[in-house]
Image (cartoon, rainbow, N blue to C red):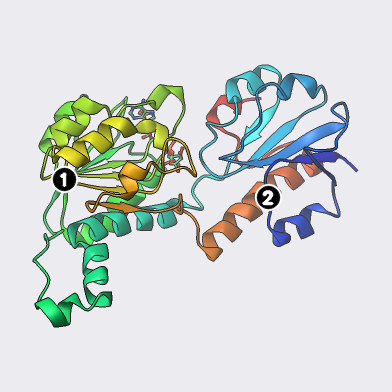
Amino acid sequence: MPDLLQIGGITEAMRQRLDPVFDIHQLSDFDPGAITHIITNGHDGVPPELIPRLNNLKVISVYGVGYDAVDASAAAQRDIVVTHTPDVLNLEVATTAVLLMLACYRDLLRDDAYVRSGSWEAEGNAPLTRSADNQKIGILGLGRIGQAIADKLAPWNPEIVYHTRRPKDVPYRYFDDLAKMAAYVDVLICITPGGTGTRHLVSAKVIEALGPSGTLINVSRGSVVDEVALIHALQSGQLGWAGLDVFENEPHVPQALRDLPNVVLLPHAGSATEETRAAMGNLTVDNLLQHVKSGEVLTPVPECRDQ
Ligand code: A2R
């Protein structure tokens, strides 16, 4: 039986499919020379110092589409294939983005608290909110999930625009400059990968360009947004609202952010439904089982294709 190193938790359903095929080892007790496969997740990844110690490692299967916690280029150089779980979570993360945007526009949390606290009865109707219809919405990263977000927003009749490094074959206006797009839109939705290439792409300048009537939604990685600049802008009124599923130092969320009334906060729950997590778990396991069976994997990350 091949030896699988488990980093982070796996579900019971995943374990039941892996158990008949692999000897599963934990980080606390394994023989580095024996490990041929790793199962991990987007948060824990693989500690960089570990990979050079595993001379027989062939596959790193990541539970999640984001794999910035794994050095995929270093793995590819050693002919180790990294896999991830694209596509199966597109709709769920898109739902999360729309949920956060609507919650910001319609002040869902404030109004919920208004009813619970008895203020409705004591003080009368709550203040008015803003309509989410007919907004200019900028998508930063129009890939698989970004496109699903654009599709899900259609009933709100938005004008969709986008910024990526290279323009796509899509019917939306392209901005080659993110700050210019931020100045143009009402809402900026971030859905790029994380990692060094996108770190603090949403800078103080971009946040300022979005402005006091602007809303920032982040369902990508906390590292994409300069969190200190974001907090400052939300506190000072330079930025209107933020809906955040991801943070720079998860699961730590700065107290300043938690104290703000103009934010909606989620615990990195973009894909976290029973149905979607089951699909992601199946694909994570399928990649490992397929490799044992045929030497191939189903969904390698771009750095590890053509291997
Ligand atoms: O830049 P392009 O043309 O490669 O377009 C990709 C864009 N992107 C960027 N846009 C602006 N500046 C960058 N430095 C930059 N780097 C990448 O992000 C592409 O349109 C999009 C990523 O799309 P996919 O690779 O299809 O990823 P998917 O499945 O939509 O997931 C995105 C991320 C994951 O990596 C997780 O971190 C998160 O969503 O859950």
Classify 10 Å Cα crowding around label 1: few (below 14), some (14-19), many (20 and above): many
Q: Is mark 2 within 8 Å of ligand 1?
A: no
Q: Quadrant of residue 92?
A: bottom left
Q: Residue at x 50, y 57 (%)?
A: 272
Q: Secondary structure at mark 1?
A: loop
Q: Position of residue 119 (x, y in %)?
A: 18, 75
Q: Looking at the image, is mark 1 or mark 2 nearer the viewer?
A: 1
The residue beneath circle 2 is 9
Q: Quadrant of residue 123?
A: bottom left
Q: Is residue 40 left or right of residue 149?
A: right
Real-space CA distance between mark 1 and mark 2, rounded to the nearest whole angstrom = 37 Å
Q: Residue at x 69, y 49 (%)?
A: 286
Q: Is mark 1 within 8 Å of ligand 1?
A: no
Task: Tell which residue pokes out farthest to the bottom in this image.
Answer: 121
Image quarter (top left, top right, bottom left or bottom right) of the C terminus: top right
Image quarter (top left, top right, bottom left or bottom right) of the N terminus: top right
* CB under 8 Å between discs 1 and 2: no
Q: Is residue 148 left or right of residue 67?
A: left
Q: Position of residue 239 (x, y in %)?
A: 17, 40
The residue beneath circle 1 is 240
Q: Position of residue 15 (x, y in %)?
A: 76, 56
Above or below for 91 versus 162 = below
Q: Amino acid at mark 2?
A: Gly
Q: Amino acid at mark 1?
A: Gly
Above or below for 235 versus 267 = above
Q: Is residue 176 left or right of residue 287?
A: left
Task: Tell which residue pokes out farthest to the front in this image.
Answer: 122
Q: Quadrant of residue 222?
A: top left
Classify 10 Å Cα crowding around label 2: few (below 14), some (14-19), many (20 and above): few
Q: Residue at x 67, y 30 (%)?
A: 81
Q: Position of residue 209 (x, y in %)?
A: 14, 31
